[in-house]
Each structure stands twice: as C-alpha cells, then as structure tokens.
Image: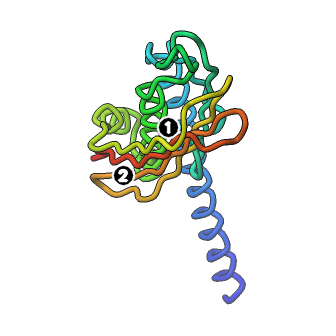
Amino acid sequence: MTTHNSTQQDQGQHNVAQQKQDQQEQVQQHLAKFVESFSSRVPFHRTIGLHFEQVDSERCVLRFDSREELIGNYIQNILHGGVIATVLDVAGGTMAAVGLIHKHGHAGEAALTERLAKLGTIDLRIDYLRPGRGKAFRADAVLLRGGNKVAVTRMELHNDAGELVAVGTGTYLVG
C-alpha cells in the first residue's frame, strides 16, 4: 500500500512539474511573439533603427546606430534628447510587457493581447547625464515592480565607449 501511495505521489509531482514547464513554454512563446511584433510593426522603431538584442525576464537590451536623422545638435554631432527618451521608453515599456506576460501568460492569447493593447506610459523621467556622442548606443531596462495595474522600470543608455549617457524611470499602466 505504501508503494502504491508513493507511486501516486510521484505521478502527481510529475504532472505538476509538467504543467509548470508547459506554462513556461507558453510564456516564452508569447514573449517571442510580442518582441517580434513590437520590433517589426511599430514604424517609429524601424525609423530609429532599434534592434532587440535581449528580452527575457531579467532584462531588455536594445541597440541602435547613430545616424544623421537622429542628431539634435548638428554642430557637435549629439543625439537628439527625444530619441534618447524614446529609446528608454521603448526599453522600459518592453520590460513592463515582459512582466505582464509572465504574470498573465497562462491566459489565452486573446486575453493577453487585450491586456498588452492597453499597456501605456503613465510617467517617464529621463536624466540626461552627458551628451549623446557615439556611433552606436545600447539601452538596458529592468523591471523594478510588476503589479496588477502598474509596472515600474529602470533604464540606462550607454554609448559605444561604455559611457552612461542617460538614465530613466518609467511607470506603465498594465491592467
């Protein structure tokens, strides 16, 4: 009798582990689909030349190259502050979406798409620490808090020399 109970218990643990693995795979599929859609379907992201290098539960990393169209100070060849703010907002918003997908990724695709469609920036604070000089830039974002209604993210922009150009904090409506 003990062997039978032990076998049932082992089977139950296996089923729970399998369900968890299936949910994680579903979340990863939702995440991959979101990143593909977000990077290819938003014309402004293409205009800036954003490339999603990494998006996972820990971090979002975006890269883009400096171009004449992105310069705000043509005399000193400095990146426009609006471009900096936009890139940091995209990185922060992506992490807010990652938090939402991890929290609600087990729901059906239609329900998740409806939630993602309502995601929006509530507040964005950018601190410009030095001029945006460089040939290429990297934006990193992390999720500080992913609640049921609001997500808060922290972002940084570095140039190709590794210098910190700007930092930001974003608050996003997620529910």
Q: Is residue 164 left or right of residue 38?
A: right
Please tell me how crowded label 1 is: few (under 14), some (14-19), or many (20+) other residues with Cα within 10 Å.
many
Tell me the kind of residue under disc 2.
Answer: Ala
Q: Is residue 172 left or right of residue 69?
A: left
Residue drawn 44% across the image and 46% down it:
168
Q: Quadrant of residue 3?
A: bottom right
Q: Nearer the viewer, residue 111 or 2?
A: 111
Badge 2 vs badge 1, beta-carbon distance below 8 Å: no
Query: Left or right: where does residue 29 sit relative to residue 88?
Result: right
Q: Nearer the viewer, residue 76 or 116?
A: 76
Residue 122, relative to residue 131: is it above or below?
Answer: below
Location of residue 130 in the rendering, given as x and y in whole percent from the top left corner: 54, 39
- Where is residue 8? Give x, y as percent: 63, 74
Give the labeled residue for mark 1.
Answer: 91
Mark 2 or mark 1, whichever is nearer to me = 1
Residue drawn at x 36%, y 36% is: 116
Q: Residues within 10 Å of mark 2 (few under 14, many from 20)?
A: many
Q: Amino acid at mark 1?
A: Ala
Residue 44 falls in image quadrant: top left
Disc tally is: 2
Q: Earlier in the sequence, mark 2 or mark 1?
A: 1
Residue 59 or residue 115, whichever sits in front: 59
The residues bearing labels 2 and 1 have C-alpha atoms spaced at a distance of: 13 Å
Residue that carries the numbered disc 2 in the rendered image: 151
Residue lying at 51% horizontally and 36% vertically, measured from the top left: 30
* Number of the label disc, if any, that sits on residue 162: none
Instruction: Identify the residue at image location x=62%, y=39%.
Output: 158
Q: Quadrant of the N terminus?
A: bottom right
